[in-house]
Image (spheres, grey):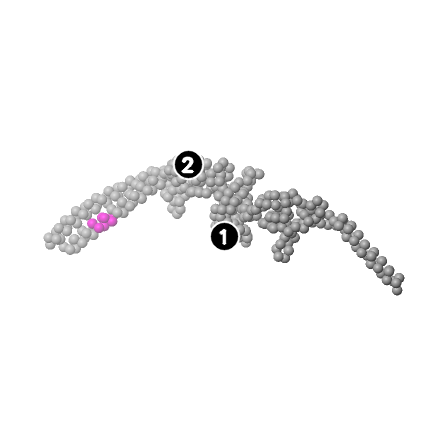
């Protein structure tokens, strides 16, 4: 019995020694992959695509039909408010003005004659020397002459306005983006005003009209900082701010987007209307110590920790986290800049 008991004790001792040896050799064979904690600014952004447009763009045309006789502005012309841009042939319009003037003169003469006749018949009627029918006829002719005069006056005013429309002036200071007509061309203003020129008010103040996906729209707010690039200037970044979120949706291939307007200062006039802009809307940003998300261990109660390799030792540290972009997270406490955090481990 004693011999059997000794054997059991020896066997147990060998097992314990073997386990300790395995644990020690196992620790030595573990390899850690680390990343350096760095100080920086982390931003959460919404990406979208849009087009550069002038803040104010006006189409200039005329409300009368005619043949274009002269053009004084062209593409890229800088124009001032009130500057003459083009003229229509005025012969027909001037003839209509002359006819309206003659009609007014005849109407005035007719009214003068009707008034005289009315005054005579009225005196006779009051003296019992004219019938009531004659008096009413004279009054009726007088009233009709007054209406004809009013119509003639209105026609003359319209003829003057139409003649003035033959001269097309710029309504604003700006730059001509487009000229849509040529000398000798006949324009018809029967159903709509034909466009002669498209003028941008100020090319130093542009905007981006960007289409933002409905899933991202809830994060976009007025005043948020925006950066964007255009293909014309590779490597150069432009800046702006969100100035408007339009509530009218666009549906393209079952994808719903909303137009977000971004103010884009353009002091050097590098940005041209129609350029494609790739924008990033800065939703949230925070500066601090950045560590990879994969280094975190998150507990059920939301507390986070990570391991730091320091002087050959492995330290478990609790940290307070800030914002994350899915790749990095801001560690507000628990980690210093330059420390090595463990992101993974494996044994040989």
Residue drawn at (14%, 51%) of the image:
122
Range covered by the magenta-colored residues:
142-148
Give residue 301's quadrant in the image.
Answer: bottom right
Q: In the figure, is residue 120 to the left or right of 166?
A: left
Label 2: few (<14), some (14–19) or many (≥20) C-alpha neighbours in 10 Å: many
Where does residue 285 sit, x and y in percent of width and height? 56, 46
Can you identify the residue that label 1 sits on? 249
How many numbered discs sit on the rendered protein? 2
Residue 116 visible in the picture: yes
Q: In the figure, is residue 268 to the left or right of 35?
A: left
Residue 72, compared with residue 252, is above or below; it is above
Residue 48 visible in the picture: no
Where does residue 216 sit, x and y in percent of width and height? 54, 51
Q: Which mark is residue 79?
A: 2
Mark 1 to mark 2: distance in Å?
36 Å
- Which of the pair 227/332 is nearer the observer? 332
Q: Which mark is residue 116?
A: none
Element assignment for label 1: strand
Label 1: few (<14), some (14–19) or many (≥20) C-alpha neighbours in 10 Å: some
Residue drawn at (85%, 58%) of the image:
10
Where does residue 7 sit, x and y in percent of width and height? 86, 60
Element assignment for label 2: strand
User: Is residue 144 on the magenta stretch?
Assistant: yes
Main SS type for the magenta part? helix
Residue drawn at (80%, 56%) of the image:
16
Residue drawn at (23%, 45%) of the image:
107
- Which of the pair 318/202 is nearer the observer? 318
């Amino acid at each position: 019995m004693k011999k059997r008991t000794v054997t059991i004790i020896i066997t147990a001792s060998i097992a314990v020694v073997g386990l300790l040896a395995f644990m020690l050799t196992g620790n030595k064979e573990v390899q850690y992959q680390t990343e350096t904690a760095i100080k920086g600014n982390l931003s959460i952004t919404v990406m979208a695509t849009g087009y550069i447009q002038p803040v104010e763009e006006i189409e200039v045309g005329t409300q009368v039909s005619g043949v274009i006789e002269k053009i004084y502005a062209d593409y890229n012309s800088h124009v001032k408010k009130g500057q003459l841009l083009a003229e229509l042939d005025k012969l027909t319009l001037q003839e209509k003005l002359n006819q309206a003037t003659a009609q007014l003169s005849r109407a005035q003469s007719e009214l003068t004659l009707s008034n005289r006749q009315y005054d005579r018949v009225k005196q006779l009627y009051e003296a019992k020397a004219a019938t009531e029918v004659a008096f009413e006829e004279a009054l009726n002719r007088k009233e009709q002459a007054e209406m004809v005069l009013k119509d003639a006056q209105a026609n003359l005013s319209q003829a003057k306005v139409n003649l003035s429309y033959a001269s097309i002036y710029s309504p604003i200071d700006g730059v001509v983006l487009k000229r849509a007509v040529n000398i000798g061309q006949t324009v018809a203003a029967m159903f709509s005003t034909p466009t002669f020129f498209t003028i941008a008010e100020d090319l130093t103040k542009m905007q981006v009209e960007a289409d933002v996906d409905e899933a991202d729209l809830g994060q976009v707010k007025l005043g948020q900082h925006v950066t964007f690039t255009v293909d014309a200037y590779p490597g150069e970044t432009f800046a702006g701010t969100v100035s408007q979120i339009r509530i009218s949706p666009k549906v393209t291939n079952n994808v719903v987007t909303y137009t977000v307007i971004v103010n884009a200062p353009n002091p050097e006039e590098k940005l041209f209307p129609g350029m494609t802009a790739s924008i990033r809307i800065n939703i949230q940003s925070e500066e601090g110590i950045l560590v990879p998300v994969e280094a975190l261990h998150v507990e059920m109660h939301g507390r986070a920790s990570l391991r730091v390799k320091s002087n050959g030792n492995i330290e478990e540290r609790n940290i307070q986290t800030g914002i994350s972009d899915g790749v990095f997270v801001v560690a507000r406490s628990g980690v210093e800049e330059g420390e090595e955090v463990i992101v993974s481990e494996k044994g040989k």
